[in-house]
Image: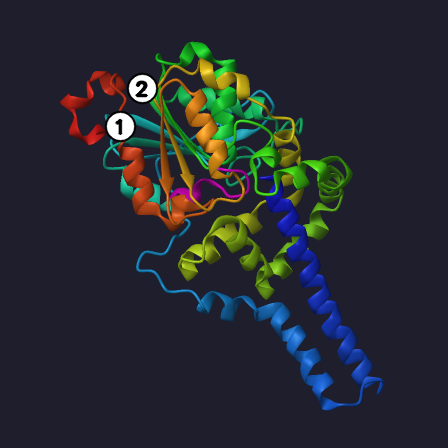
Amino acid sequence: MPLDFLFRWLAGLLAVALLGGGIYILHEWYERELIDRAWLILGWGMVLWSFVGFIPLTLLRRFGKNEPKQVRSSDTQRLTRPDGSEIHVEFYGSPSAPPLILIHGWGPNSTVWYYAKQQLADRFRLIVWDLPGLGKSTKPKNRDYSLEKYAHDLEAVLSLAEQPAILLGHSMGGMIILTFCRLFPEHLNQRVAGLVLVDTSYTNPLKTAILSRLLCALQKPVIEPLLYVTIALSPLLWLISGLSYLNGSMHLTTELSGFTGRETRGQLDFATRLGLMASPGVLARGALAMLRYDETATLPTIDVPVLVIVGQSDIATVLPAHQRMSADLPQAELVVLHPAGHMGLMERHTQFAEAVRSLIVPNLNGKSPSSDPGLL
């Protein structure tokens, strides 16, 4: 989400200021401009914190029994796209089970579905893929990171499902699904049996984030120029992001934008590292595409069952935006995870999986809900 870029820049500036300030203080101390030994301790403390600050910050969180890891499946396939990108697709669960296609958000990759793969693969044939430019999927050669491009990629992934499928998208993944519904309405109730929209938006995400009026006012003079600077300085920003990870400032911004303080140390560190792995330039191009996104008129045209899931404390896509989506969608149910933020699928993973299981799709796998209690 574009809001994440503001946090990322703030974390980067803090990282540079911390390390640069520490080096400056040490230089001045050795030059005898600063004589008190307290300055020496402060300088070394700032430099040391720049490289290991994340350790005490993560230790302050509780340790979970089932911490997320980057788990990959051996059952894979690669799809070559007309723009030169290649999509990495993974499969989990029985091939005869109802298909559930998972579309991750912008920033992480498909390993973000660690808990979903554990908790949903017994009921569904999970089809998981990395968005081109992220994870194991390669970049489009024409640098097209539009929502329409990814909607066409989703159609290609959908062709791998042998039965009508449920589409589940988190954050930008949900935006891709709504764009898909506009471009390919003929697939609804044919190849697509239902939708799950998680912590997402139906329009420019700056309009559905916290402090939306301020963010929209800053879009043209600040946010868009900042994104273009990110593209131009991508290698440098990647290096600064690595430094902000080490000093813990990226952990703080990840918690602020995605969690509510109840996450485990492993969940916080895992989500932070996923955001670090992606190229800042790629992320900036996708964020620019999101600023041109609006599927408000698409919502009333979607005639399949839809489950809308949102974290009660999500600041990237606030609760009222999901209430608006639920009201405009003809067959929608709203589930609020609490306490949870934008990463409720991780922080409240059990509650999230139960919500997904609750989606009733009468024609899924050719069965009525009453004939298969696993779909209730």
Relative to 10, is 143 above or below? Answer: above
Q: Nearer the viewer, residue 78 or 340?
A: 340
Is residue 108 magenta-colored?
yes
Q: To which residue does mark 1 refer?
A: 95
Q: Is residue 222 visible?
A: yes
In the image, what residue type sits under mark 1?
Pro
Q: In the image, is 222 to the left or to the right of 371?
A: right
Q: Is residue 161 visible?
A: no
Relative to 163, is 346 above or below? Answer: below
Where residue 235 appears, as percent x and y from the top left, is 70, 49
Q: Nearer the viewer, residue 46 or 203?
A: 203
Where residue 255 appears, as percent x and y from the top left, is 51, 55
Relative to 362, is 205 above or below? Answer: below
Q: In the image, is 240 to the left or to the right of 74?
A: right
Read off the magenta span.
105-113
In the image, what residue type sits under mark 2?
Glu
Q: Nearer the viewer, residue 22 or 258?
A: 258
Graded by Cα atoms within 10 Å as few (under 14), some (14 to 19) or many (20 or more), the crowding at tag 1 reads some
Does the CB distance between marks 1 and 2 fall below 8 Å? yes
Q: Earlier in the sequence, mark 1 or mark 2?
A: 1
* Disc ID at residue 162: 2
